[in-house]
Image (spheres, grey):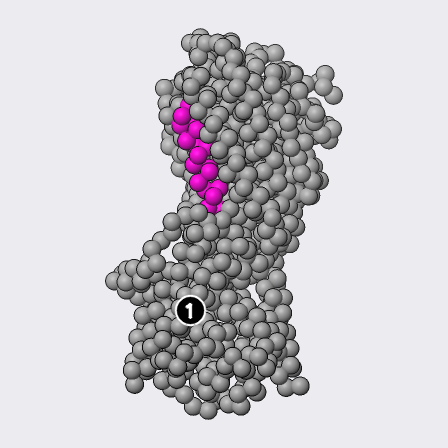
């Protein structure tokens, strides 16, 4: 099985001609076999190639440590669908159909992904295509069945997305999620890049995952230019990534408490999230880590004094956060609300290819930091935490444990920062290469694949946000639930709209 | 006469203060400063100065809903004695009118919600009436128990009948009655653990979702009506819970105002220390409240 793949390491580049161009049927069979053996599709995308399209599929081994990549060329504009057999591919196939106009044969759920126009070979023609949300929705009919449509304008300050519930009284039969309102045409804009603005755009793929996406991007650039990053830069990148995780997990704990109307934890976590954001600001002057990462290293150093100050602020935040979380855990009315709400089985989670805390809450051991270690995680591992029940409580528990793990990790790293250059000037990008970089953002696996053309410019840059895998998980978690529990389930996944919409 | 005037002044002026006290208590528990005590008044004055937006699909019912609801609640306010003072309007059987004035208000609120044709508001209306059906018997059991004790169907003599000596005689029954009444007080006023008045999540709301389409002065009517309802049920509750009288009318008014503020703080504490119930569990708690008051009735008639 493995011998049939072209394997590579996380954050490395290979010449495109080394990746065998398989026959279409062999390609599909290989994907089927791999997914059957527990591999997972991290990315599956197409690019213009001659008159037809070239397809690449990036697969991750079940126990990690290996990335496989396979490729095929499609000239007749059709591709048989594998979604019925491998549900985790369904969104990728819809995306390929939308971006490249390929006819995906026998796809069970062929609907727009982002309502975008097909990708053009050159340049950038603006992001708009169809009007998002104008499409046919799945409908249930019968006595007492009613439809509830929520969004894209919501009562709270959240991103736009449209949700269609088919309900029987208070029970949800089916939820359909329709996104694309924030489609900016990022992948189209990246063609012929990197441009001067590219790094800023990468940081804004999902504004709350600046470091996660930024790191994946600089890793692809470094792989393509053969630039080695110093230990010090690796360590500080890891610190920034964990600070981002801490801030967002803390915010999520507060938001989950807020959704069950447990106000003390909600208020405290809201403040402590700000403390973590301010620590990132101490590193680079931006609360969200903008400008911290540069290709070849980092933009800002951390002096001994700063490390000292960060350590003491971490200790304070750890104490405050511990109290706030303990309060939530010791309130039976709050934990009772989280248990058995929005349960997702391990089997469903595996079939849908979930990633990140949502997958780990179902008992799936998936963490890029452990499976495909990058940067500092290669030398200094961080323990992976899992839960088993797959409900809102499990997703909250995973966050709680990850907060503790990240705090321990940060204390260890900050106390012992290695020496090294801040950053090196990377050379130009290797032409006709393909680079893959995966990072574990706070939502889960982020996968960036850069394919360069003969001039060393991006012929295609594929971004896969964890939300791309996980939105379907949310829809499935709602089946048979109370519609009033949707906000709580949604918050426990806390997926990105703009990361999905690109 | 001065008592009647004071009664009217209090029901007009004081209800929003309870909301301010509740919010401040919650803020204190959450380690925040919180909005000023008078914030609900500022909100009301802002809403009254605002224009309104009404959907094209709505009819007169939508606009009359908040007005009728407020009018019904204001009339109910004339029937409830505040502290140990007589209510401005009192006659045999007024307790039934009191209960059904609230029902009338609810009827028009839900009708106005259904009038918008929005799926959320329909959902909210369905929830509101389902839970109201379960809360109503509790209120009646409590009132019937009081009728049995005092021998009258009128609120003023009924509530004035209570005194520390009555508590000594039937304390157990009254405690059960108060427990049931407190649960109904929280449920009827959309407080945690039944509903979250501060939430913005339209799918989880009960009362708030029914008034999503109202704006400006109409919404002001709704907010003020809701505060008044809390005030009235609170006054009923405190009349039973603290049947103290000093003999001095002025001191009694002070005592009443103080007891209402204590009630607001207690609601704020309940809202701070517990999370909201799962929607599907709410009927269970309401039925428990009904059983409590029913049992108190059994204790009194035995």
Q: Is residue B137 visible?
A: no
Q: Quadrant of the N terminus of chain A?
A: top right
Question: Is residue B138 or residue A361 the one in the foreground?
Answer: B138
The structure residue drawn at horizontal position 40% and vertical position 25%, both measured from the top left corner, is A282
For residue A214, above or below residue B112: above
The structure residue drawn at horizontal position 55% and vertical position 29%, both measured from the top left corner, is A407
The structure residue drawn at horizontal position 53% and vertical position 16%, both measured from the top left corner, is A416
For residue B201, above or below residue A424: below
Helix, strand or loop status at disc 1:
helix
Assess whether residue A278 is covered by the magenta stretch: yes
Task: Give the main secondary structure of the magenta stretch.
Answer: helix
From which residue to which does the magenta span run?
A: A266-283
Left or right of residue A275: residue B286: right
For residue A396, above or below residue B214: above
Location of residue B82 by image quarter: bottom left
Residue A126 at x, y percent in the picture: 37, 32
Residue A252 at x, y percent in the picture: 52, 41
The structure residue drawn at horizontal position 50% and vertical position 66%, both measured from the top left corner, is B186
Residue B51 at x, y percent in the picture: 27, 62
Assess whether residue A84 is covered by the magenta stretch: no
Name the residue that disc number 1 marks: B260
Chain for disc number 1: B
Question: Is residue A28 or residue B118 the one in the foreground?
Answer: B118
């Amino acid at each position: 099985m493995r011998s049939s793949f072209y394997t590579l390491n996380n954050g490395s580049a290979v010449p495109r001609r080394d990746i065998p161009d398989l026959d279409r049927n062999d390609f599909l069979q290989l994907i089927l076999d791999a997914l059957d053996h527990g591999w997972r599709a991290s990315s599956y995308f197409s690019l213009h190639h001659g008159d037809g399209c070239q397809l690449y599929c990036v697969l991750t081994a079940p126990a990690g440590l290996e990335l496989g990549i396979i490729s095929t060329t499609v000239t007749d504009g059709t591709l048989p669908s594998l979604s019925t057999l491998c549900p985790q591919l369904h969104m990728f196939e819809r995306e390929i159909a939308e971006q490249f106009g390929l006819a995906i044969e026998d796809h069970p759920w062929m609907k727009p992904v982002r309502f975008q126009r097909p990708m053009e070979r050159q340049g950038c023609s603006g992001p708009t295509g169809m009007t998002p949300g104008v499409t046919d929705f799945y409908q249930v009919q019968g006595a007492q069945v009613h439809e509830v449509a929520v969004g894209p304008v919501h009562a709270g300050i959240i991103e736009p997305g449209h949700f269609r519930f088919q309900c029987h009284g208070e029970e949800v039969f089916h939820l359909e999620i329709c996104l694309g309102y924030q489609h900016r045409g990022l992948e189209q804009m990246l063609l012929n890049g990197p441009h001067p603005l590219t790094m800023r755009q990468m940081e804004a793929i999902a504004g709350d995952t600046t470091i996660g996406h930024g790191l994946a991007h600089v890793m692809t650039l470094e792989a393509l230019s053969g630039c080695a990053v110093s230990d010090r830069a690796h360590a500080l990148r890891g610190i920034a990534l964990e600070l981002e995780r801490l801030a967002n997990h803390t915010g999520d704990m507060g938001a989950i408490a807020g959704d069950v109307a447990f106000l003390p934890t909600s208020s405290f976590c809201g403040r402590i999230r700000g403390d973590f954001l301010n620590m990132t600001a101490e590193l680079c002057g931006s609360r969200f880590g903008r400008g911290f990462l540069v290709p070849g290293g980092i933009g800002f150093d951390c002096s001994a004094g700063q490390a000292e100050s960060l350590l003491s602020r971490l200790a304070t935040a750890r104490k405050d956060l511990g109290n706030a979380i303990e309060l939530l855990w010791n309130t039976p009315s709050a934990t009772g609300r989280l248990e058995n709400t929005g349960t997702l089985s391990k089997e469903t989670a595996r079939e849908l290819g979930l990633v990140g805390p949502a997958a780990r809450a179902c008992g799936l051991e998936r963490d890029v930091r452990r499976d495909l270690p990058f940067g500092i995680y290669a030398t200094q591992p961080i323990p992976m935490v899992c839960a088993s029940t797959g409900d809102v409580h499990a997703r909250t528990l995973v966050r709680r444990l990850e907060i503790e793990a990240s705090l321990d990790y940060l204390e260890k790293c900050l106390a012992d920062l290695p020496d090294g250059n801040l950053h090196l000037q990377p050379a130009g990008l290797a032409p006709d290469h393909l680079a893959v970089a995966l990072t574990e953002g706070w939502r889960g696996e982020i996968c960036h694949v850069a394919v360069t053309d003969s001039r060393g410019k991006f012929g295609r840059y594929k971004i896969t946000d964890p939300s791309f895998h996980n939105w379907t998980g949310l829809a499935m978690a709602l089946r048979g639930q109370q519609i009033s529990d949707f906000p709580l389930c949604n918050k426990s996944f806390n997926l990105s709209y703009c990361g999905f919409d690109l | 006469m001065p008592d009647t005037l004071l009664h009217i002044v209090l029901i007009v002026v004081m209800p929003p203060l309870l909301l301010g006290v509740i919010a401040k208590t919650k803020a204190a528990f959450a380690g925040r400063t919180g909005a000023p005590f008078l914030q609900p008044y500022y909100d009301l004055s802002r809403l009254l100065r605002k224009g309104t937006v009404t959907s094209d699909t709505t009819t007169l019912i939508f606009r009359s809903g908040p007005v009728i609801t407020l009018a019904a609640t204001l009339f109910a306010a004339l029937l409830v004695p505040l502290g140990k003072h007589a209510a401005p309007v009192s006659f045999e059987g007024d307790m039934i009118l009191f209960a059904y004035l609230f029902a009338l208000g609810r009827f028009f609120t839900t009708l106005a919600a259904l009038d918008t044709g929005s799926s959320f508001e329909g959902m909210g209306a369905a929830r509101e009436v389902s839970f109201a059906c379960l809360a109503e018997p509790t209120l009646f059991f409590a009132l019937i128990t009081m009728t049995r004790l005092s021998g009258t169907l009128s609120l003023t003599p009924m509530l004035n009948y209570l005194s520390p000596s009555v508590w000594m005689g039937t304390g157990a029954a009254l405690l059960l009655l108060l427990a049931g009444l407190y649960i109904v007080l929280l449920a009827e006023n959309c407080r945690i653990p039944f509903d979250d008045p501060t939430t913005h999540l339209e799918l989880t709301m009960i009362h708030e979702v029914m008034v999503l389409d109202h704006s400006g002065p109409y919404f002001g009517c709704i907010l003020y009506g809701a505060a008044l309802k809390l005030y009235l049920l609170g006054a009923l509750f405190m009349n039973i819970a603290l049947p103290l009288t000093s003999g001095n009318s002025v001191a009694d008014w002070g005592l009443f105002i103080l007891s209402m503020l204590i009630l607001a703080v207690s609601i704020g504490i309940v809202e701070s220390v517990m999370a909201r119930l799962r929607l599907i569990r709410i009927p269970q708690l309401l039925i428990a409240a009904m059983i409590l008051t029913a049992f108190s009735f059994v204790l009194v008639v035995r």
